[in-house]
Amino acid sequence: MRIVIKVGTSTLAHTNGLLNIRRVENLCKVLSDLKNAGNDIILVTSGAIGMGCGKLQLKEKPKDVATKQAAAAVGQCELMYVYDKLFSEYNHNVAQLLLTGSDFEDYTRHTNFMNTMDRLLELSALPIINENDTVATDEIKVGDNDTLSALVAVSVNADLLVLLSDIDGLFTADPHKNADARLINVISEIDENVKKLAGGEGSSLGTGGMVTKLRAAEICTADTCDMIIANGQNPFLLYDIIEGKAVGTRFLKRMVKR
Ligand code: GLU
């Protein structure tokens, strides 16, 4: 299988922005194992801004663009340092790709991206993607990594996109407020009722929320890629997902892969 896994800041970092070492170690271990088993693994990672804030000891997520971009520049180094170190332990070579929205809109840049991805996967490297936050201003950015990971999944013709988040999936009501809220296992159509279930909130350090996750699901499922929202607290869940067990919320693709 070709799988894109997107990991959010809330999975990678503690609330103060510093690395959640146990979580990241487990994630890299599972992804290395899935790669050893013959799957193509592509990681889309958030956490640059959050980790930069931690390293720079900023008390909260900055509001101005320049400080956000500065934090991203600091945090991205830290992120790749950690991934390189951990994946190296399992003999996997990581590759960093920083993209913005215009890289998907411009034909030449998009083709270059796809050619590079093909070659990296042929060379058995593990592509690690984030938005190029230091240059991405409002006009050209994708804006959130849920959407970015869906654009990546469609570009590389992935079989599955997994969004690892701080929630088990999509619920019938807000599980923080309603004890009767029930996890929805499968969604075959993203209609108005499903959209109404998505609240707007994300974590204090990340960018996404359920709204961006549904947008990602729309992009994937309109193509040939299923998408799953699952809880990133336990990266070992990825084994169950690959085995086809019911984990989190699965959005079913519309088109049949040729
Ligand atoms: N690119 C941002 C970062 O690395 C994250 C965006 C997101 O969380 O969706 O901090």
Image (cartoon, rainbow, N blue to C red):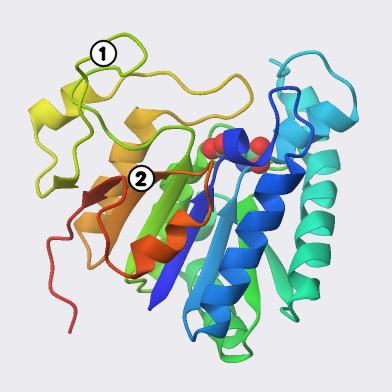
Nearest to the observer: residue 180 or residue 51: 180
- Whether residue 8 appears in this view of the structure is yes
Residue at the disc numbered 1: 179
Amino acid, disc 2: Ile
Indicate whether 187 appears above or below 40: above
Please tell me how crowded label 2 is: few (under 14), some (14-19), or many (20+) other residues with Cα within 10 Å. Answer: many
Ligand 1: does it lie within 8 Å of the C-beta at label 1? Answer: no
Q: Is residue 163 left or right of residue 103?
A: left
Q: Quadrant of residue 237?
A: bottom left
Ligand 1: does it lie within 8 Å of the C-beta at label 2? Answer: no
- Whether residue 136 appears in this view of the structure is no
Q: Quadrant of residue 133?
A: top right
User: Residue 60 location in percent, x, y?
Assistant: 74, 14
Q: Is residue 5 left or right of residue 47?
A: left
User: Residue 136 location in percent, x, y?
Assistant: 64, 41
Residue shown at 50%/84% (left/top)?
37
Label 2 sits on a secondary structure element that is: strand
Between disc 1 and disc 2, the foreground one is 1
Residue shown at 52%/72% (left/top)?
41
User: Residue 104 location in percent, x, y?
Assistant: 46, 59
- Quarter that holds the C terminus: bottom left
Indicate whether 241 appears above or below 202: below
Residue shown at 22%/68% (left/top)?
224
- Quarter that holds the N terminus: bottom left
Q: Residue furthest bottom?
A: 122
